[in-house]
Image (cartoon, helix red, strand yellow):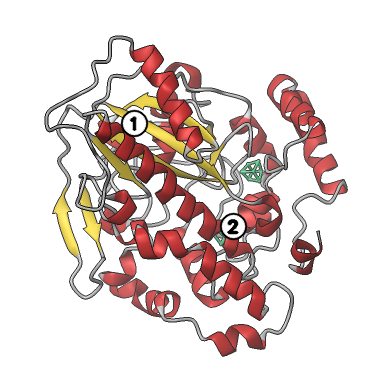
Amino acid sequence: MKPDIIAKGASSYVVGKVERFDQKNEMFKRPSWDPSQSDVGKRFYATKDYAELLERNKPGYTFQDIAFTDAAWLLEREFAKGIKGGKQGLFAWETNEFSQDKRPPGVKLAVNDPAKMTRDIKKVATFFGASLVGVCELDRRWLYSHYYDVHDPRNPKHEPLELPEEYKYAIVIASEMDYEASKSSPAHLGAAATGLGYSKMAFTAGLLGQYIRCLGYKALPCGNDTACSVPLAIDAGLGELSRMGFLITPEFGPRVRLSKVLTDLPLVPDKPIEFGVWDFCLKCERCADYCPPRAIMWGEPTEDIPNISNREGLLRWPVNGEKCLKFWATNGTSCSNCIMVCPFNKPPGWLHSAVRWGIKHTRWMDPLFIKFDDLLGYGKQSNGEHFWEQ
Ligand code: SF4
Ligand code: SF4
C-alpha cells in the first residue's frame, strides 16, 4: 500500500498501533543499559586510540583529517551535548543567566497575523543557518514517551515525558552536510560532515529558540531528543521517508541533519510534499547494496521490525540499528555510506535539478536514472585526498 503523504503526512506510514517511543531504546542509548549492546558501546564510546587511527596510514585517516573532524564536533560536544540527552547549553529550554533577554518580565509580542509570523520565523531560522525550515502541528504520537539522559553516563536519568498541550507547533530545521567531505565515508574525514551537521543543529535550533523566548513565547530547542525528527519533518513539508530510514529532501537528498523547536508561538503549518521517493526506493536499493554491515534491507517495505530500536505499527523499511552501530564501533568513527550513494544526494546544479524534476514527473524513467547515476560514477567513495585538493 503506497502512503498518501500529501493527504496524511507521516500518518500515512502508520498501519497498526503506534506507541510513543521510549528514548531508552534508541540505539545510541542502549549500550548504557542493555547487556546485549554493552560491548559495542564500550568500543564505540571509548576514547579513540589515536595511534590506531593513524596506523591506517591512508587518506581520510591522516593527522589533519582527524583534527578537522574533531573540530567540526566542537559546538555539539562542548556547548550542546544534545547526543547525551539535550535540554542543556545551546539546547536549554529556559532563558538562563548566560542568555540575552532584555524584555521586562511578562511582556510578549502580540501575534495578530500567524502567517506573517511564520514567514518571519523562517527568515530568522535561515539567518541563523538553517538550510531548510518548515512548520507542522505537533503530532503527539512522535513525542518520546520517556527521556533517557546520559549526561552522567554512570547515572542515566529515565523519566516520563509529558509536554503541556500549549506546545502546539514544531519548527523543523534541516542543516545541510558538506557534499565533498561526506564522499569520503566511511573514512574519518567523512565524519567531519556529520560532526559539523550536529554542531549546526545546536547552533541554529538554540538561537531560534532563544529568539522565540525573547518574543515572550515558549520554545524548546531539540536535537535528536524529545521527539522523532523524521515524521515531524515529513509533516512540515521538508521531504519523504526513504529506504535508509532518513528523510530525503528535494534540495539535498538525505544529506541533512534535523533539529526542531517546539513552541506555543502562533504559526501556520506547512503541507507535506511528495516527489517520488517511495516509488524510487522500491526500484533502487543502492543504500542496501553499499551498507557495509547490511543494516538496510532489500525488497518491499514491511511492518516487521529487527529489534527494539525500531517502532512497531509502521509500514516502511526498518533499519537495523544494532548492525549499524556495531559497524561504527569497528570502523572507529561514524559512517554515511547510505547518504553518500543515494541518487538523491547531489550538489546543487541545473542538471541535478532536471533529474529531480524527472524523478517527480516521469516515474517510468526511474530505472534509467538509477543506471545513469551508476554510469556517471555518483556514489563512489573518494579517498580523502580529493577533499583537500579541490
Ligand atoms: S550509516 Fe553506514 S552502517 Fe549505518 S545504515 Fe548507513 S551505510 Fe549502513
Ligand atoms: S539509495 Fe536508493 S533506495 Fe536508498 S534511500 Fe536513496 S533512493 Fe532510496
Label 2, label 1: how far apart the Cα atoms are: 25 Å
Q: Which residue is under mark 1?
A: 170
For numbered disc 1, what is the local secondary structure? Answer: strand
Taking the image in four quarters, ligand 1 sits in the one at bottom right
- Near-viewer residue (213 or 194): 213
Q: Is mark 2 within 8 Å of ligand 1?
A: no
Task: Single out the residue that lies furthest toward the right.
Answer: 375
Percent position of residue 390, x then y: 81, 58
What is the secondary structure assignment of the residue under circle 2?
helix
Identify the residue at horizontal 15%, vertical 32% (top origin): 104
Q: Is residue 167 above or below residue 188?
A: above
- Density class for disc 2 (Cα within 10 Å; few <14, some 14-19, many ≥20) is many
Say which quarter of the image contains residue 205.
top left
For this view, does 35 lie left or right of residue 107? Answer: right
Image location (x, y in percent) of residue 183? 70, 57
> Mark 2 or 1 closer to N-term?
1
- In the rendered structure, find residue 193 and report the number of the disc placed on it: 2
**Is residue 73 visible to us here?**
yes
Q: Is residue 4 visible?
A: no
Q: Amino acid at mark 2?
A: Ala
Q: Position of residue 375 (x, y in %)?
A: 87, 47
